[in-house]
Image: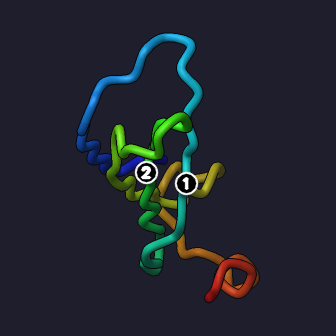
Amino acid sequence: YTRTSHFEYKRPLVLGETIVVRTWIEEFAPDGVRVEFEIRKKANGKLASDGWCHYTLIDLQTGRATRIPPSILAKYAI
C-alpha cells in the first residue's frame, strides 16, 4: 500500500526516450519502508525526476497495517 509519494520533476521526458531508473531503500519503519528513486535520461545522464514513496505493509486478512517480518528485514538490511 502506498502511504505517501513525493515526485520532483526536473526536466521533461519525450515519448520513446530511454531512461534509467534507480531505486533504493532509505529506511525501514516497523510497518513500512521508504523507497527513494531517481530517473535519468540515458543519453546524457541528466536527472529528469527524483523522489520517494513510503509503503505500508498490509495484512490481506484484516486490511490493516502490520509489522514487517524479520525475514524480510534481514533480506534487505544493509
Image quadrant assignment for residue 29: bottom left
| Percent x, y of residue 45 | 47, 46
Residue at 47 percent of width and 78 percent of height = 28
Check disc 1 and report its element: helix, strand or loop: strand
Disc 1 residue crowd, few under 14, some 14–19, many 20+, Cα 10 Å: few
Dot 1 or dot 2: first in sequence order is 1
Is residue 51 placed above or below 17 in the rendered structure?
Answer: below
| Percent x, y of residue 50 | 34, 49
Check disc 2 and report its element: helix, strand or loop: strand
Viewer-closest of 43 and 14 = 43
Q: Going by the image, does 36 lie left or right of 70?
A: left
Residue at 43 percent of width and 15 percent of height = 14
Query: How many marks are shown on the rendered structure?
Result: 2
Q: Which mark is residue 22?
A: 1
Image quadrant assignment for residue 73: bottom right
Q: Mark 1 and mark 2: span between their CA atoms?
A: 5 Å
Q: Which mark is residue 4?
A: none
Image quadrant assignment for residue 54: bottom left
Residue at 42 percent of width and 66 percent of height = 34
Going by the numbered disc 2, the residue's amino acid type is Glu
Viewer-closest of 26 and 17 = 17
What residue sits right under mark 2 in the picture? 38
| Percent x, y of residue 37 | 45, 54
For the residues bearing labels 1 and 2, Cβ distance under 8 angstroms: yes
